[in-house]
Structure formats: C-alpha cells, structure tokens
C-alpha cells in the first residue's frame, strides 16, 4: 500500500444472497454509486485492509474463456469499450452467482466492485463484505442497533491490475487465500490461474527474508538465528512435499516479533504467494555462503563463521580457512 490514497474512478455495490449449503441469487443496483467522500473513505479503508492481509494468491487469467469468462469481460470493458462499468459489474455478478452456487460453504454479502488508481496502477477491485451489528446513540441519547459493513474481517476479495495486464506481466491478479474452499471459488470467479513455480517462489521468499534482515539491521547472531529457523521449517516442508503456510513460517522464524516479518513478506512488490511446496535447492543461501572467482570457488556454512573454522578479516578483505583437512594440506604441500 502506498502513502498516496487510492483514487476511486467507478464504484458499484450489488448483493449476493446465499446461505451455506443454499442456492445463490443476486440483487443488482440500478446504477453506479456517486464517487463522493464516503465512497473514497470506504475504498481507502478497504484497500488498507486488503494490503494488510497476510497470505495472498497471485496469478494470471486462465486461457479457457468459456469456463473462465472474466478475461473476456475485462477485455470488452477496458480494451474494446463495448460495455461500460455497470455492464461489467452485472456480468461479474452473474458469474459470481454461478461460482458461489457451486461452493456449499460460500455465504452472501454485499459485493463492492470498483475501478481505482492505486500506486500508479489501474485496478479493478472486488470484495465481498458482510454486515455486523454495532451500536449508535440517537439524538435523544438512546442506544440503538446500527448495522454496518464489517470491513475489519475482510475474507473474500481480489484485484486485477489492468496496468500490469496491459504490460504483459507474468502475474496481475491477486486474491485473499482465506479458507481453502471459499478462496478457491473466488479464484475460479476471477478466472485466476495461480500455478506457482516452486523454485521461483522459494527464491522470492529467501529474498524477502534477506531484505527483512537488512532493513531491521539485525546483528549477525540474530540474523543467523532467523535464517536457521526459517531454513529448518522450509527444509521440513520440502522434505515432506507439503505446502508451507506463511503465518506459520513467520512464527517459527522470528518468534519475538512475527508481525514485523509478516508485514515485510506481505509487501505487494514482492508478490509472494502462500501455500507452495518449498524448493530445497533455493533455501541453501539461508545456511550457506557460496561464491566463485575466476580461479576459485568456495562454499561454507554460516555456522563456520561462529565456530572460527572460517574467519572474515573485514579490514584486509581476506577470508581465512582453518581446520583444513589433511588431504587438502597434503595436496597443497605437493604444489609448494
């Protein structure tokens, strides 16, 4: 989320009517909502909640537009200009009704559909928001029930970045993972193919951990402990061919302040997906240093620096190896 608040260009609210294990119906608003101060505050708060939610899925449109028509709707609206924003929202609602009807656990609520400019990106934002009953005080100082949108418990939402789509980006859709079944029906509604390349995602995770350690200016022992705990968790998941959970990772890797690590890894610029099986090849940098020059190549564990088996002389920019094996010493003696 950028410091500049998002700008609302279009906004409409429809309603999805469904109870768990029930049928889905929709109620459509006749026209767009006015983009006034209330609409602007609503979208600002919604974007803040969305950006702050940990563990999103990322992907691109499915190619099968017969079963996943969202890319066709978006093309007709944003590029062909054969439909307007209200037409787009109604087509989306009809498809959402179908997908929600296929998922027994899906429930209804108000569906907010907006076109916004956020951080230099032109985006379509879709969120399913429920109501919560609060309290209000009348002019006569009486307490009354006051239904309001429950934005703090946002569970179902997604964004389509039209700017990234136009630029041919690899991934331009994001959505809240939420509970597995609910997240899956909303992913299908968005037409999102979130196939994850384990190696690339693991490399991004290692990059995120490294950036966090640098941003926090962690002392070397604390940095090593962070990386060691993260490596242990990721190695276990990879060995078991089991998907990781980012919320579990941050608790294991940085138990003293997991929320700080959570915010760092949830940086939208990183686009780090949740629920992939770690590639064990990509987590080696968390435990080992590796480098090579024109005539040499070296690799050693971080623990070697703590034990003194490897010494880095910062002033002379020299790396000193101790406890050399006898075979290496013999081979070097033969060359002297």
Image: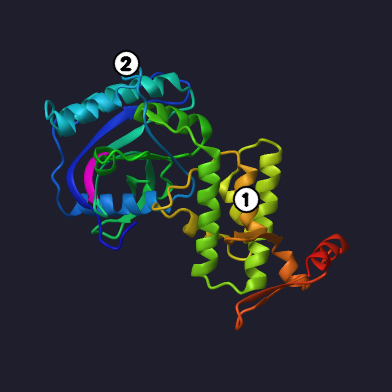
Report if the CB atoms under discs 2 and 1 are less than 8 Å apart: no
Considering the whole magenta stretch, tell me its main secondary structure.
strand
Q: Does dot 1 land on a helix, a strand or a loop? A: helix
The label on residue 206 is: none
x%, y% of residue 164?
A: 29, 42
Magenta segment: does it hold 303?
no
Residue furthest out toward the bottom: 315
Q: Residue furthest right?
A: 326
Q: Residue furthest top?
A: 66
Which quadrant holds residue 102? Answer: top left
Query: Circle 2 is placed at which residue position?
Result: 66
**Residue 325 position in % (x across, y down):** 85, 63
From the viewer's perspective, tell me whether residue 113 is left or right of residue 273: left
Q: Is 174 left or right of 104, judged from the image as shown?
A: left
Q: Which residue is mark 1?
A: 283
Identify the residue shown where x is 32% and y is 16%. Answer: 66
Sequence-wise, the earlier of marks 2 and 1 is 2
The stretch of residues the image draws in magenta is 113-117
251 and 334: which one is in front? Answer: 334
Q: Is 219 drawn above or below residue 62 in the view shown? A: below
Q: Residue at x 25, y 61 (%)?
A: 4
Quadrant location, the N terminus: bottom left
Q: CA distance from mark 2 to mark 1?
A: 40 Å
SS at mark 2? loop
- Residue 250 seen from this side: yes
């Amino acid at each position: 989320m950028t410091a500049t608040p998002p700008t609302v260009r279009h906004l409409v609210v429809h309603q999805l009517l469904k109870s768990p294990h029930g049928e889905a119906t929709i109620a459509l608003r006749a026209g767009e909502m006015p983009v006034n101060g209330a609409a602007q505050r609503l979208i600002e708060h919604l974007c803040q909640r969305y950006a702050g939610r940990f563990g999103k899925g990322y992907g691109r449109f499915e190619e099968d537009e017969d079963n996943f028509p969202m890319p066709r709707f978006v093309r007709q609206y944003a590029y062909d200009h054969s439909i307007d924003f209200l037409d787009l929202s109604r087509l989306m609602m009809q498809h959402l009704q179908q997908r929600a009807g296929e998922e027994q656990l899906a429930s209804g609520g108000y569906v907010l559909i907006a076109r916004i400019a956020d951080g230099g990106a032109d985006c379509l934002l879709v969120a399913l928001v429920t109501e919560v009953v609060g309290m209000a005080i009348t002019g006569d100082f009486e307490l009354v029930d006051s239904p309001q949108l429950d934005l703090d418990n946002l569970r179902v939402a997604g964004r389509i970045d039209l700017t990234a789509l136009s630029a041919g980006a690899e991934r331009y859709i994001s959505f809240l993972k939420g509970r597995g079944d609910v997240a899956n029906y909303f992913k299908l509604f968005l037409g999102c193919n979130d196939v994850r390349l384990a190696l690339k995602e693991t490399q991004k995770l290692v990059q995120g951990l490294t950036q966090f350690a640098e941003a926090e200016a962690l002392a070397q022992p604390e940095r090593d402990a962070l990386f060691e705990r993260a490596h242990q968790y990721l190695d276990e998941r990879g060995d078991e061919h089991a998907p990781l959970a980012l919320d579990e990772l941050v608790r294991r890797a940085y138990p003293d302040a997991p929320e700080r690590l959570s915010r760092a890894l949830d940086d939208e610029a990183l686009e780090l997906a949740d629920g992939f099986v770690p590639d064990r090849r990509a987590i080696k940098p968390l435990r080992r240093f590796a480098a090579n020059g024109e005539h040499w190549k070296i690799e050693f564990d971080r623990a070697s620096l703590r034990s003194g088996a490897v010494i880095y002389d910062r002033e002379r920019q020299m790396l000193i190896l101790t406890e050399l094996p006898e075979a290496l010493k013999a081979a070097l003696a033969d060359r002297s």
